[in-house]
Image (cartoon, rainbow, N blue to C red):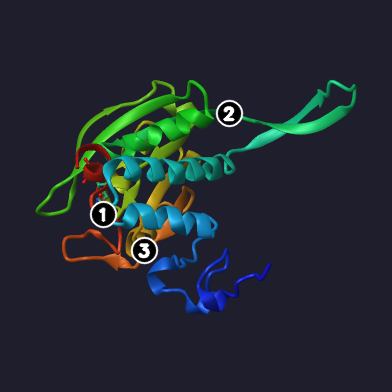
């Protein structure tokens, strides 16, 4: 069978890197604490589904959940492990690893709650705290309404969850809350679907020990501080539209 060439626009490498539409290429940022998921054709196809304004809510939820699962799996790669010696059923010794330390999730409500199930699917009975932060629709400034966090959060690794990272104001406020509760910056991992280049750069500089795992860094922000090309209002599309 003939393998289609990239010039035909199909296949796993559908176009050479330099010829891809700009908006499908994640912006690069040069911070050691920012990790962008591998830009596979699968990921770009999933992102295309959720960016499409015609995608119905059920599909938006399904495809967002798939990306969230990829983010959680990658986030877990950043947790520390220690050596663990075991024996296999055929009597062989095997020197492997196990996770070290306790974890918890913290979702920034409302949109961040959409990421909780993906975390639960990977970490059975994981504890989850909540921080309710809403962006003011006029000023775009974040406002903190409420938080409820595990009592021993200062002893845990925290997976902070919010799909959208626009100005970075909401995530910054959430990190301040966690730091006030005694969580050291290096034990916070922020999992995010789409980031703006300015938001992620400011955040990475402000919190150099905190790690960000994101699926994609977009082109920028519009006049209403929405991410572009973005996907619109994540919370509305996941919960109410
Ligand atoms: C959205 C999003 C982030 C925030 C991102 O939430 O989920 O929390 O905006 O914007 P920022 O980086 O400029 O702060 P929003 O406040 O709209 O509430 P929602 O989760 O209820 O949709
Ligand atoms: N919140 C969203 O849901 N989307 C954006 O683009 C910005 C903030």
Inter-mark Cα distance, 1 to 3: 20 Å
* Mark closer to the observer (1, 3): 1
* Mark closer to the observer (2, 1): 1
The residue at which mark 1 appears reads as: 54
Label 2 residue near ligand 1, CB within 8 Å = no
The foreground one among 34 and 222 is: 222
Q: Is residue 121 visible?
A: yes
Label 1 packing within 10 angstroms: few (<14), some (14-19), many (20+): few
Q: Is residue 204 visible?
A: no
**Mark toward the start of the polypeptide (3 vs 2):** 2
Return the residue found at the far front.
1
Inter-mark Cα distance, 2 to 1: 43 Å
Inter-mark Cα distance, 3 to 2: 33 Å
Return the residue found at the far left.
138
Residue at the (65%, 70%) spot, across then down:
3
* Mark closer to the observer (3, 2): 3
Residue at the (70%, 33%) spot, across then down:
82
Marks 3 and 2 in Cβ contact (< 8 Å):
no
Q: Position of residue 145 (x, y in %)?
A: 18, 33
Q: Is residue 90 above or below residue 25?
A: above
Q: Residue 53's quadrant in the figure?
A: bottom left
As drawn, the label of residue 101 is 2
Residue at the (17%, 66%) spot, across then down:
223
The residue at which mark 3 appears reads as: 218
């Amino acid at each position: 069978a003939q393998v289609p060439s990239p010039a035909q626009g199909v296949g796993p490498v559908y176009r050479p890197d330099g010829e891809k539409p700009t908006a499908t290429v994640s912006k690069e940022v040069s911070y050691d604490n920012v990790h962008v998921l591998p830009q596979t054709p699968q990921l770009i196809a999933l992102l295309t589904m959720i960016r499409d304004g015609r995608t119905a809510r059920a599909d938006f939820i399904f495809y967002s959940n798939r990306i969230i699962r990829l983010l959680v799996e990658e986030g877990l790669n950043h947790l520390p492990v220690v050596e663990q010696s075991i024996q296999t059923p055929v009597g062989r010794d095997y020197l492997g690893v196990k996770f070290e330390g306790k974890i918890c999730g913290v979702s920034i409500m409302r949109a961040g709650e959409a990421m909780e199930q993906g975390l639960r699917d990977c970490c059975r009975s994981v504890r989850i705290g909540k921080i309710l932060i809403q962006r003011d629709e006029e000023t775009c400034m974040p406002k903190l309404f409420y938080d409820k966090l595990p009592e021993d959060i200062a002893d845990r690794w925290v997976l902070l969850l919010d799909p959208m990272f626009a100005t970075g104001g909401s995530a910054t406020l959430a990190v301040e809350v966690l730091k006030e509760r005694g969580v050291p910056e290096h034990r916070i991992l922020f999992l995010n679907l789409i980031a703006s280049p300015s938001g992620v750069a400011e955040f990475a500089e402000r919190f150099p020990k905190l790690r960000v795992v994101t699926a994609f860094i977009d082109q920028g922000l519009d006049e209403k501080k929405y991410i572009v090309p973005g996907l619109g209002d994540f919370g509305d599309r996941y919960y109410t539209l």
